[in-house]
Image: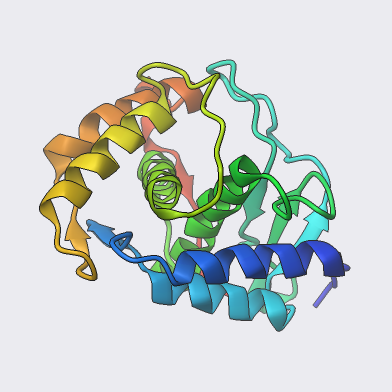
Amino acid sequence: MPSITTDAELARNVAKVLREAAGLRNTAFQYKNFVVTGIRYGVIADLVDAGRIACSVGTPSSANLPGGSRAVAEYVASPGSRGGHAPDQFILPRSNFGEFIGNERMTIVHEAAHAIHDVFLAMPCLAIEDEATAWLAQAFYLRTSNSSFSLGGLQVNGPLDLALKLADRIMARNPAGLTATVHEAEIMPLKAAVAIDYGFLAGAAGILSVYDGVP
Protein backbone atom coordinates (compact mmCIF):
# COMPACT_ATOMS: atom_id res chain seq x y z
CA MET A 1 0.00 0.00 0.00
CA PRO A 2 1.39 3.47 -0.83
CA SER A 3 2.40 5.30 2.32
CA ILE A 4 1.75 8.81 3.59
CA THR A 5 4.26 10.24 6.02
CA THR A 6 2.46 11.23 9.20
CA ASP A 7 3.48 14.45 10.91
CA ALA A 8 4.23 13.18 14.41
CA GLU A 9 3.48 16.46 16.21
CA LEU A 10 0.19 16.87 14.39
CA ALA A 11 -0.79 13.26 15.12
CA ARG A 12 -0.15 13.81 18.83
CA ASN A 13 -2.32 16.94 18.82
CA VAL A 14 -5.16 15.22 16.94
CA ALA A 15 -5.15 12.19 19.25
CA LYS A 16 -5.07 14.43 22.34
CA VAL A 17 -8.08 16.45 21.17
CA LEU A 18 -10.04 13.31 20.32
CA ARG A 19 -9.33 11.76 23.71
CA GLU A 20 -10.63 14.93 25.33
CA ALA A 21 -13.77 14.66 23.19
CA ALA A 22 -14.06 11.00 24.16
CA GLY A 23 -14.25 11.97 27.83
CA LEU A 24 -17.02 14.56 27.49
CA ARG A 25 -20.54 13.71 28.63
CA ASN A 26 -23.86 14.42 26.93
CA THR A 27 -22.34 14.57 23.43
CA ALA A 28 -23.48 11.25 21.92
CA PHE A 29 -26.14 11.31 19.21
CA GLN A 30 -27.63 9.22 16.43
CA TYR A 31 -29.21 10.40 13.20
CA LYS A 32 -30.29 7.55 10.94
CA ASN A 33 -27.21 5.31 10.71
CA PHE A 34 -24.81 8.08 11.75
CA VAL A 35 -23.73 7.51 15.35
CA VAL A 36 -21.22 9.75 17.13
CA THR A 37 -20.10 8.84 20.67
CA GLY A 38 -17.18 9.37 22.98
CA ILE A 39 -16.08 5.78 22.59
CA ARG A 40 -15.88 6.26 18.83
CA TYR A 41 -13.71 9.38 19.19
CA GLY A 42 -11.39 7.21 21.28
CA VAL A 43 -11.23 4.61 18.52
CA ILE A 44 -10.22 7.28 15.99
CA ALA A 45 -7.51 8.49 18.39
CA ASP A 46 -6.20 4.92 18.63
CA LEU A 47 -6.15 4.61 14.82
CA VAL A 48 -4.17 7.86 14.60
CA ASP A 49 -1.69 6.57 17.20
CA ALA A 50 -1.31 3.34 15.27
CA GLY A 51 -0.68 5.17 11.99
CA ARG A 52 -3.74 3.63 10.37
CA ILE A 53 -5.13 7.13 9.88
CA ALA A 54 -2.38 9.51 8.79
CA CYS A 55 -2.07 13.17 9.82
CA SER A 56 -0.58 15.41 7.14
CA VAL A 57 0.15 19.13 6.90
CA GLY A 58 -1.40 20.63 3.79
CA THR A 59 -4.35 22.37 2.15
CA PRO A 60 -7.70 20.65 1.58
CA SER A 61 -8.35 19.67 -2.03
CA SER A 62 -11.59 21.71 -2.02
CA ALA A 63 -10.66 24.59 0.27
CA ASN A 64 -13.06 27.07 -1.38
CA LEU A 65 -16.63 25.98 -0.77
CA PRO A 66 -19.40 26.99 -3.21
CA GLY A 67 -21.20 29.04 -0.55
CA GLY A 68 -18.17 31.28 -0.07
CA SER A 69 -16.79 29.66 3.08
CA ARG A 70 -13.25 28.33 3.23
CA ALA A 71 -12.29 24.90 4.55
CA VAL A 72 -9.03 24.78 6.50
CA ALA A 73 -9.06 21.05 7.25
CA GLU A 74 -10.20 17.82 5.67
CA TYR A 75 -10.61 14.14 6.44
CA VAL A 76 -9.78 12.20 3.31
CA ALA A 77 -11.30 8.75 3.12
CA SER A 78 -9.44 6.85 0.43
CA PRO A 79 -11.99 4.53 -1.17
CA GLY A 80 -10.35 1.24 -1.90
CA SER A 81 -7.56 1.82 0.63
CA ARG A 82 -7.79 -1.89 1.38
CA GLY A 83 -6.71 -2.57 -2.18
CA GLY A 84 -3.50 -0.57 -2.36
CA HIS A 85 -4.52 3.10 -2.44
CA ALA A 86 -3.09 5.74 -0.11
CA PRO A 87 -4.43 5.43 3.44
CA ASP A 88 -7.11 7.58 5.04
CA GLN A 89 -5.80 10.83 6.49
CA PHE A 90 -6.49 14.12 8.24
CA ILE A 91 -5.14 17.12 6.33
CA LEU A 92 -4.58 20.13 8.59
CA PRO A 93 -2.70 23.39 7.98
CA ARG A 94 0.08 23.21 10.60
CA SER A 95 1.94 20.73 12.77
CA ASN A 96 0.74 22.48 15.94
CA PHE A 97 -2.87 22.78 14.75
CA GLY A 98 -5.18 22.22 17.73
CA GLU A 99 -2.46 22.54 20.34
CA PHE A 100 -3.40 25.99 21.68
CA ILE A 101 -6.55 27.31 19.96
CA GLY A 102 -10.05 26.10 20.85
CA ASN A 103 -11.51 26.81 17.42
CA GLU A 104 -8.88 24.56 15.88
CA ARG A 105 -9.79 21.78 18.29
CA MET A 106 -13.43 21.89 17.30
CA THR A 107 -12.34 21.74 13.65
CA ILE A 108 -10.47 18.53 14.45
CA VAL A 109 -13.60 17.13 16.11
CA HIS A 110 -15.64 18.03 13.02
CA GLU A 111 -13.23 16.15 10.75
CA ALA A 112 -13.09 13.26 13.21
CA ALA A 113 -16.85 12.82 12.82
CA HIS A 114 -16.18 12.03 9.15
CA ALA A 115 -13.57 9.52 10.26
CA ILE A 116 -16.12 7.95 12.61
CA HIS A 117 -18.52 7.55 9.69
CA ASP A 118 -15.74 6.00 7.61
CA VAL A 119 -14.84 3.47 10.30
CA PHE A 120 -18.26 2.59 11.69
CA LEU A 121 -20.72 3.31 8.87
CA ALA A 122 -18.22 2.05 6.28
CA MET A 123 -20.50 2.57 3.29
CA PRO A 124 -21.45 5.39 0.92
CA CYS A 125 -23.79 7.98 2.42
CA LEU A 126 -25.34 11.26 1.41
CA ALA A 127 -22.69 13.97 1.68
CA ILE A 128 -25.24 16.49 2.96
CA GLU A 129 -26.03 14.22 5.92
CA ASP A 130 -22.35 13.40 6.43
CA GLU A 131 -21.57 17.11 6.75
CA ALA A 132 -24.63 17.99 8.84
CA THR A 133 -23.74 15.39 11.46
CA ALA A 134 -20.11 16.58 11.49
CA TRP A 135 -21.31 20.12 12.22
CA LEU A 136 -23.52 18.79 14.98
CA ALA A 137 -20.59 16.89 16.50
CA GLN A 138 -18.58 20.11 16.41
CA ALA A 139 -21.39 21.97 18.16
CA PHE A 140 -21.65 19.39 20.95
CA TYR A 141 -17.90 19.67 21.51
CA LEU A 142 -18.07 23.46 21.65
CA ARG A 143 -20.84 23.35 24.25
CA THR A 144 -19.16 20.80 26.53
CA SER A 145 -15.39 21.33 26.24
CA ASN A 146 -13.40 23.48 28.67
CA SER A 147 -11.53 25.03 25.75
CA SER A 148 -12.05 28.71 24.93
CA PHE A 149 -13.72 29.46 21.62
CA SER A 150 -14.15 32.60 19.53
CA LEU A 151 -17.49 32.94 17.76
CA GLY A 152 -17.14 36.57 16.72
CA GLY A 153 -17.52 35.78 13.03
CA LEU A 154 -20.31 33.25 13.43
CA GLN A 155 -22.54 33.20 10.35
CA VAL A 156 -26.15 33.71 11.44
CA ASN A 157 -28.21 30.74 10.24
CA GLY A 158 -25.05 29.16 8.88
CA PRO A 159 -24.16 25.54 9.62
CA LEU A 160 -22.43 26.14 12.97
CA ASP A 161 -25.10 28.55 14.22
CA LEU A 162 -27.89 26.08 13.45
CA ALA A 163 -25.86 23.14 14.77
CA LEU A 164 -25.36 24.96 18.09
CA LYS A 165 -29.08 25.68 18.38
CA LEU A 166 -29.89 22.05 17.66
CA ALA A 167 -27.27 20.80 20.14
CA ASP A 168 -28.72 23.08 22.82
CA ARG A 169 -32.22 21.68 22.28
CA ILE A 170 -30.99 18.10 22.32
CA MET A 171 -28.88 18.58 25.46
CA ALA A 172 -31.83 20.21 27.25
CA ARG A 173 -34.04 17.19 26.71
CA ASN A 174 -31.55 14.33 26.81
CA PRO A 175 -30.15 12.88 30.06
CA ALA A 176 -26.36 13.07 30.28
CA GLY A 177 -24.66 9.85 29.26
CA LEU A 178 -27.38 8.64 26.89
CA THR A 179 -27.22 8.69 23.11
CA ALA A 180 -29.70 11.26 21.81
CA THR A 181 -31.90 10.53 18.81
CA VAL A 182 -31.86 13.32 16.22
CA HIS A 183 -35.14 13.58 14.33
CA GLU A 184 -35.45 14.48 10.66
CA ALA A 185 -37.65 17.52 11.25
CA GLU A 186 -35.21 19.13 13.67
CA ILE A 187 -32.08 18.58 11.56
CA MET A 188 -33.67 19.84 8.31
CA PRO A 189 -32.67 23.52 8.83
CA LEU A 190 -29.06 22.44 9.41
CA LYS A 191 -29.11 20.26 6.29
CA ALA A 192 -30.50 23.21 4.30
CA ALA A 193 -27.67 25.47 5.50
CA VAL A 194 -25.11 22.78 4.62
CA ALA A 195 -26.66 22.44 1.16
CA ILE A 196 -26.12 26.15 0.51
CA ASP A 197 -22.60 26.29 1.94
CA TYR A 198 -21.36 23.17 0.18
CA GLY A 199 -23.34 23.46 -3.04
CA PHE A 200 -25.47 20.37 -2.40
CA LEU A 201 -28.40 21.85 -4.31
CA ALA A 202 -30.70 20.47 -7.01
CA GLY A 203 -28.97 17.50 -8.65
CA ALA A 204 -25.97 17.83 -6.34
CA ALA A 205 -28.16 16.93 -3.35
CA GLY A 206 -27.51 13.28 -4.14
CA ILE A 207 -23.70 13.50 -3.98
CA LEU A 208 -22.24 10.73 -1.85
CA SER A 209 -19.40 10.56 0.63
CA VAL A 210 -17.72 7.24 -0.13
CA TYR A 211 -16.60 5.39 2.99
CA ASP A 212 -15.40 1.80 3.19
CA GLY A 213 -13.71 1.52 6.56
CA VAL A 214 -10.10 1.86 7.68
CA PRO A 215 -7.87 -1.16 7.11
Estimate the x, y position of residue 169 in percent, counting from the top left.
18, 41
Q: Could one spot residue 52 in this view of the protein?
A: no
Estimate the x, y position of residue 167 in percent, counting from the top left.
28, 44
Q: Which image quadrant: the C terminus?
A: bottom right
Q: Residue at x 44, y 73 (%)?
A: 40
Q: Which image quadrant: the N terminus?
A: bottom right
Estimate the x, y position of residue 165 in percent, counting from the top left.
27, 33
Which coloring applies here?
A: rainbow
Q: Residue at x 55, y 47 (%)?
A: 106
- Counting every numbered tag in the picture gives 0
Of residues 164 and 181, the one nearer the viewer is 164
Q: Could one spot residue 25 in this view of the protein?
A: yes
Of residues 183 and 207, the one nearer the viewer is 183
From this view, report whether residue 135 is shown above or below residue 154.
below
Estimate the x, y position of residue 26 in percent, counting from the top left.
28, 61
| Location of residue 131 (image quadrant) | top left
* Residue 57 placement, left or right of 202: right
Of residues 138 and 61, the one nearer the viewer is 138
* Residue 63 placement, left or right of 120: right
Q: Residue at x 71, y 83 (%)?
A: 50
From this view, report whether residue 200 is shown above or below residue 136.
above
Q: Residue at x 56, y 66 (%)?
A: 18
